[in-house]
Amino acid sequence: MGVLKQSSQSQPYVNPKPWTLDSTHPRSITKKIQKSSAILPSASPTNRQSSNHRRHGHHVRGTHRSSPKSDNVYLKLLVKLYRFLARRTDASFNKVILRRLFMSKINRPPVSLSRIVGNINKDAEEKRTVVVVGTVTDDNRLLTVPKVTVAALRFTSTARARIVKAGGEAITLDQLALRAPTGSNTLLLRGPKNAREAVKHFGMGPHKHKKPHVVSKGRKFERARGRRRSRGFKV
C-alpha cells in the first residue's frame, strides 16, 4: 500500500466566501453609534443636574395646596377671581381668602350666628362686613339677631332667613370682591377647628381624657375596670 506524503510547504486556509458585515447588522450599527457619539459634545453640568433631579423626584418639597381638590365650578371661579386680586393688589386679605378657598372641609369649620354676633361691635358707627370662608349656620339659642352683613361661601336656609329678617344681608364672596376688593372694613372669622366629634377620640394612653369608642351606653358597657376604684383603677 502506498503512503500519502504531506507537503512540506503548508498553504494558509482561505475562505472562498468571506463573511462581511452589511450596514443593517447590529454590530455595524453599534460602531456607527460609537463614532457619532465621539463627535458629539459631552453633557453639560446643568444637564447632569437636571437628570439627577428627575431621578430623585420622589422628594416633595411643599405639600400645601395650590388649588382646591373640589370640582365645584363655582368654587373654581372664586379661586380664579381671588387669585387675580391676590396678584394685582397689595392687600393680604385676598391672599388669606385664596388660601382658605383651597382648604378641605375639615379645615373650613362652620360658623354659627351666635359666634358672629359675639364678635361684632354693636356700638360701632361704621358696621363692618363679616367674612366667613365656609358655611354660616343658625343657632336656636340666639334669641335676637342684629342687623349685619355677612359674606360666606354658603348659608343654611334658616341662617339666611334670620339675617335677612333682621334687615341684614347675606352675600357671596364674589359680591364682596365688588364691594371691598382690598378687604377694607371687613371682619374675617372662622369656626372652631377642633370641635368635631372625631377630635374627642384622639390621644394615646390613659389620663388623656380621650373619649372611648363605646358600642353602646348602658349598665353593661365599660363600667368596670378602669372606671371604678373598686375594679382595679379609675382613669
Image (tube, grey):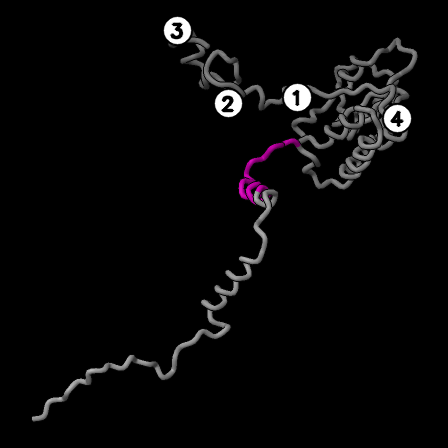
Q: Is residue 183 visible?
A: yes
Q: Residue at x 47, y 68 (%)?
A: 28
Sooner in the amino-acid sequence: mark 1 or mark 2 = 1
Tell me whether the residue at label 1 lies in contact with that at label 3, contact meaning CB atoms closer than 8 angstroms. Answer: no
Secondary structure, mark 1, is loop
Say the numbered circle drawn on residue 230: 3
Q: Residue furthest front?
A: 8
Residue bearing mark 4? 180
Q: Is residue 156 visible?
A: no
Tell me whether the residue at label 4 lies in contact with that at label 1, contact meaning CB atoms closer than 8 angstroms. Answer: no
Q: CA distance from mark 1 to mark 2?
A: 21 Å
Residue bearing mark 2? 213
Residue bearing mark 1? 193
Quick check: is 135 in the magenta stretch?
Answer: no
Secondary structure, mark 3, is helix
Identify which amino acid the numbered label 2 is placed on.
Answer: His
Q: Which residues are magenta?
A: 49-64
> Is residue 4 placed above or below 122 in the rendered structure?
below
Q: How many labels, in total?
A: 4
